[in-house]
Image (cartoon, helix red, strand yellow):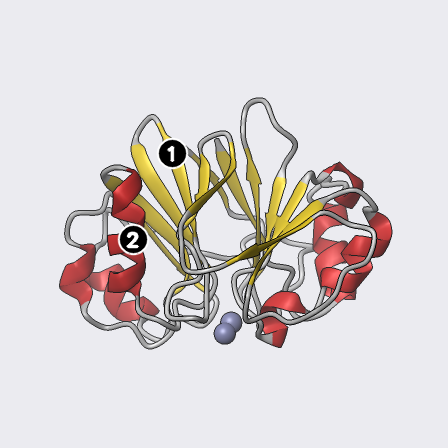
Amino acid sequence: MKVTILYDNEVKKRGLKADWGFSALIETEKASPILFDTGADSPTLLHNMKELDIDPKNMGIIVISHAHGDHTGGLYEILKENETAELYIPSSFRRAFSGRKVTIVGKDAIQIGENVFSTGELGGIEQSLALKTNKGIFVVVGCSHLGVRNILRAAAKFGKVYGIAGGFHGFRDFKTLDELSLISPCHCTQYKKEIKKLFKDETLECGVGLVIEL
Ligand SMILES: [Zn+2]
Ligand SMILES: [Zn+2]
């Protein structure tokens, strides 16, 4: 399994664009790729996809973590490019998508694809992904508005959590990360420096173009 960062406040490679927002692509062995969030604007997202040789038409599923514009802004252009992808959106994201298969995710965890699960819309705000890998559960988060600890607890239902990537927002209860082997604080994480200092060996600096092989 592979997670590629497509949209982030920072970049890891030349030619890619940084902007406030988040998007990641999840590639599994058999199924078509899953797009998790769509960043704040479509020109930036589509530019980064093109540079990373990712075709928006290939995505089979699009998951939106929560209703904020820095995660949903690129969605409509992607839907124009890709007419078949199924959507998994949290119930708080009230939009109609005609002619498309849409799963409204409520508070309960659900399976999205092989080895890919949603934690459910925790706190009535936000869903995160739990990826089942050989190393354990890898969690992909949008902004963690409801708290990293709560998300990790929900993800632990699927197995022992190995790592996490995404926006941690104002998270600073750092001991919550003690058991993890891979930590990639992205996007809105306010305490990136502190996390890197505390978890030197486990931290992977996030940015557009980062590929996490799992
Ligand atoms: Zn947000
Ligand atoms: Zn955000």
Residue 29 seen: yes
Q: Nearer the viewer, residue 170 or 68?
A: 68
Q: Would you say residue 182 is visible in this rendering? A: no
Q: Which residue is mark 1?
A: 132
Q: Nearer the viewer, residue 28 or 189?
A: 28
> Residue 132 location in percent, x, y?
38, 34
Residues 25 and 61: in front is 61
Q: Amino acid at mark 2?
A: Ala
- Residue at (78%, 63%) from the top-left corner? 76
Amino acid under label 1? Lys
Q: Earlier in the sequence, mark 1 or mark 2?
A: 1
Give the class, few, some or many, for how many residues have Cα within 10 Å of label 1's Cα (few <14, many ≥20): many
| The C terminus lies in quadrant | top left
**Mark 2 surroundings within 10 Å by alpha-carbon count, few (fewer than 14), some (14 through 19), many (20 or more):** some
Figure check: 214 above or below 48:
above
- The residue positioned 39% from the left and 73% from the top of the image is 145
Q: What secondary structure is marked by label 2?
A: helix
The answer to whether residue 211 is left or right of residue 200 is: right
Residue lying farthest to the top in this orientation: 30
Quarter-of-image position of residue 208: bottom right
Rendered view: 125 above or below 62: below
Residue 73 picture location, percent across and down: 69, 69
Measuring from the top left, give residue 70's x and y in whole percent: 60, 72
- Side of 133 relative to 200 (left or right): right
Say which residue appears at 85% left-offset and 55% top-offset: 80
Q: Position of residue 126 (x, y in %)?
A: 46, 65
* Residue shown at 72% from the left, 47% from the top: 101
Residue that mark 2 sits on: 154
Is label 1 in a helix, a strand or a loop? strand
Residue 74 left/right relative to 175 = right
